[in-house]
Amino acid sequence: MRKERVATPKKTITIIVPCYNEAEGLPLFYDEWKKVVQDLSYEFFLLLVDDGSVDATWSVMEELREKDARVCTLALSRNFGKELAMLAGLDYAQGDAVIFMDADLQDPPSLIPAMLAEWEKGYQDVYARRRSREGETWFKKKSSHVYYWLLRHMADIDIPMDVGDFRLLDRQAVDALCRLRERKRYTKGLFSWIGFRKKEILFDRPPRAAGMTKWNYWKLTRLAFDGIASFSEVPLHIASLLGLLCSGSAFLYLLFIFIRTLFYGDPVAGYPSLVCIILFIGGIQLIVLGIMGEYIGRIYSEAKHRPDYLVMAWHGDSKEGKFEEK
Ligand code: UDP
Ligand code: MG
C-alpha cells in the first residue's frame, strides 16, 4: 500500500479476524470497524483469515479488498480451526501491534480506542473481559467456573475468567507467540504463558450479529482438555496415584481375605464382589491408558512436524508469512 510521507510515521495496527463461514456477518463487521478507525490516527490493516469456509466468505473478503486497500486477505487450504487461523494471522500480520477480533461483532470494534489507549501507556497485552455472561445457561457458567479453577490449580497458569481472544498484542508479544509453534494450540494459555505487561478492560459481550456459532459442547470439551494437557502433567500424576491407591487397597483387601480364611475357613462366596472389583480395576486401567494416550497423541502429532497450516492465497502487503512452508 502507498505510504504517505509524514514527519512522524503513524503506528501501524493490524486487526486479525479469523473467519469461518462468516459471509453474512463480515460486511457488517467491516462497516462497524471502518466507522471506528476513521477517527484514529493510526495506520490500520484489516487481515481477514479465511479458515476454509464453505460459503461465500472468500468472495466477500475479496470484494472488501477491492473497495479498501487496507484489507488483506489470507485463505487457508481447509478448515484448520480458530486457533491455527489465529496463528496464521499472527505470522502474516505486520505493524506495531495486532488486535484479534471475531467476525460476528461479538467483539465490538468500539473498544479499539480504549485498547490503544492502554497500549500507549506501555501495556503489551490488553485483553477484554466480559462483564457478565447473560444469556448463557447455568450449566455453561458453572462448568466454565470449575474448568478455570482446575486449570489454575493443575497447570500453574492463571487464565483470567471470561476472557476470550479479543485482545491487543504489542509487537514483542506477537513475536513471542510466533515462536511457540505447538500444533495443538491452546491460545488462551499461550497468552498467559508469554507474560509481558498485561492490562484488563471490561466490556459487555453482545450476541452474534449474524450466522451461527461454530462451537458445540464436544468441541468445547476438546478445547478444555487441550488446555489442561498442553499446560499440565497433573493428569499423568493422577494416573499414577490412582494406580497406587488401587493396588494399595487391593493388597489390604488381600491380607484381610487371607486372615479371614485362616480363621473362618473359606465358604465359596464373593462372586459379586469379585466381579465388582474386576470391573472397577479394569475401568481405572482404561482411564489411565486413555490419559496416557492423550499425551502420546500429542507427542505423535508434534513428531510428524507437519506445517501448522497451509496457505492457499495471500493478498496483502507484506512479503509473506514468516513461517510459511517453502
Ligand atoms: N472461527 C474460525 N474457525 C473455526 C471456527 C470459528 O476461524 O473453525 C472463527 C469464527 O468465524 C469467528 C470466531 O472464530 O470469527 C469465533 O467463532 P464463534 O463466533 O463461532 O465462537 P463463539 O463466539 O460462539 O465463541
Ligand atoms: Mg461469536
Image: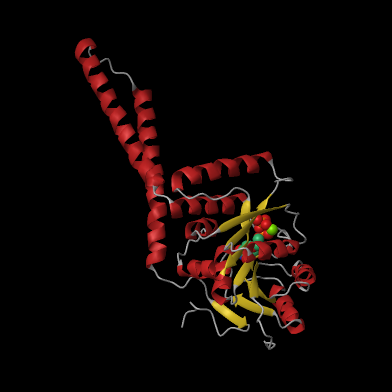
- Note whether 266 is above or below 44 in the view shown: above
Tally of numbered discs: 0
Residue at x-position 61% and y-position 60%: 126
Res 101 seen here: no
- For the N terminus, the image quarter is bottom right
Image position of 266 (left or right of 7) = left
Q: Give the farthest residue toward the front.
A: 7
Q: Is residue 184 left or right of residue 207?
A: left
| Residue 209 placement (x, y as % from top left) | 77, 60
Residue in front for this viewpoint, 242 or 191: 191
Position of residue 195 measured from the top left corner of the image (x, y, whole percent): 50, 58
Q: Quadrant of residue 273?
A: top left
Judged from the image, the quadrant occupied by ligand 1 is: bottom right
Q: In which quarter of the image is residue 120?
A: bottom right
Residue 108 on image: x %, y %? 74, 61
Q: Would you say residue 156 is visible in this rendering? A: yes
Q: Nearer the viewer, residue 82 or 172?
A: 172
Q: Which of 116 and 165 is in front in this view?
A: 116
Picture layout, residue 240 above or below residue 231: above
| Residue lying at 75% horizontally and 67% vertically, measured from the top left | 29
Image coords of residue 124 (percent x, y): 57, 63
Q: Is residue 91 left or right of residue 127?
A: left
Q: Which colour scheme is used?
A: secondary structure
Residue farthest toward the top in the current orientation of the protein: 264
